[in-house]
Amino acid sequence: MIDPHIASAFDRDLEAIQAMLMKMGGLVEASILNGAEALERRDLEMAEAVRAGDKAIDRLEEQVNEEATRVIALRAPTASDLRTVMTVIKISANLERCGDYAKNMAKRTTVLAETPPVGSASVSIRKLAREVQMMLKDALDSYIQRDADLAQQVIERDEDVDQLYNALFRELLTHMMEDPRNITPCMHLHFVAKNCERMGDHVTSIAEQVIYLVTGEMPDDARNKQDETPFMTDEG
Amino acid sequence: MIDPHIASAFDRDLEAIQAMLMKMGGLVEASILNGAEALERRDLEMAEAVRAGDKAIDRLEEQVNEEATRVIALRAPTASDLRTVMTVIKISANLERCGDYAKNMAKRTTVLAETPPVGSASVSIRKLAREVQMMLKDALDSYIQRDADLAQQVIERDEDVDQLYNALFRELLTHMMEDPRNITPCMHLHFVAKNCERMGDHVTSIAEQVIYLVTGEMPDDARNKQDETPFMTDEG
């Protein structure tokens, strides 16, 4: 930008918005871990806390949107500054979706607590959730550090998440075949597993945004991955 | 805006972007209908056309994003003009997700074609998809006409979609209990049904954006609906 005052004013505004985004990211990471732990331990109090906590995440997304729009109107950023603000808006939308999936995991915990445990499925789900949370942490770091390499690594790790999900999908199918009484709990566990896999897709999308921000190029090999994995399971 | 030249230039740019958005909406509506028809008729050629067609939808979303960003940088719109551009960006993201779900329905058709038909599930799914497509049409009309009442009606109709989904969920559970050989096809049919229900949530989110654009108030009663319905089915 030409005017250094405007530039520095923009930078201060952007820092404030990024702080909100990072706070949002921290809350979402915690929801994912706590949601999975509540599911495994059938801890209804912890599950309820995750459900309640999603409201704060939703509010933060609204704040990020309002602030970003205000900054665009006030500072009229151009080129890379504008691209950065647009990226922040998109990342906050991905975070909000992850928060919804974590909340949903917590809701199913209340339902699943009334059904018999199905093998070690909830342990596998916790592994899956843990992997997604670590990917999210790195994706947010890659944004702050403008590190396209780290973002690329996050995208590649989504395949591990897909594989964990596929193994779980087969495990659940087996339990359903074995005993019809497992069908209802397995349907819910499968939703939880699928939602973890979807969170991985949203984290991947965050990493793609970072690469776009840093390089100006959008990687399209990782596009539209959600819901692809079950087809792999048909072969497995 | 003060300067009529800038104002009219912005309006021309906005019209061009809205034209892209409407084209995108038309393609998504067609994908939803054709995806469901291909599933019911087990028409693999039609399914393949839906899969291939999603690329055009993705490209349109990228164009909408690029154009919207360009217009913001070039025209520096403020207040309601800026809000309109931000709304267009959000609506195009919702449309892109609906396109992905339709593509996914088409992919599962290839898998389901190799399994025995399960009752009249694919007929019910087509009803569900048809309802979502009509909601989407009205949501896009409500945007163009800036009609908050029509948008509110769309939001309320999402409950019909949820009910159709719940009935289907119970139907599939019954088939799975009856015969384990139904489990695999039912898992796929359930995904398709769930994705239709999720499309309804994205259409609802479009209608919410329209209400926000027209009234300045975001209705929050319809927020975060996705994945809630299976809990109702536990009572049913």
Image (cartoon, coloured by chain):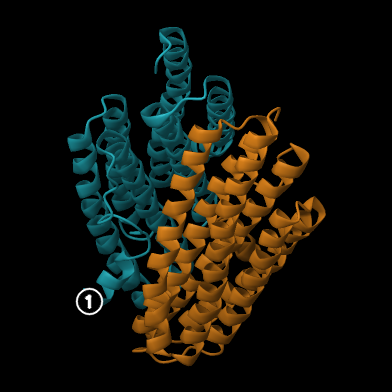
Chain colours: A cyan, B orange
Instruction: Give above or below for A57 relative to B136.
Output: above
Judge by depth and name the residue closer to the eye, A14 or B15. Answer: B15
- For the C terminus of chain B, the quadrant is bottom right
Q: Residue at x 48, y 46 (%)?
A: B67
Instruction: Give above or below for A142 relative to B44.
Output: above
Count neighbours of disc 1 (C-alpha within 10 A) and say few if under 14, some if 14 to 19, many if 20 or more. Answer: few
**Residue B212 at x, y percent in the picture:** 71, 42
Q: Residue at x 32, y 35 (%)?
A: A213
Task: Name the residue carrying label 1.
Answer: A235
Judge by depth and name the residue closer to the eye, B139 or A20. Answer: B139
A231 relative to B51 in the view: left or right = left
Q: Label 1 is found on which chain of the structure?
A: A
B211 relative to A190 in the view: left or right = right
Q: Mark 1 is on which residue type?
A: Glu
Q: Is residue B183 visible?
A: no
Question: Which quadrant holds residue A51?
Answer: top right
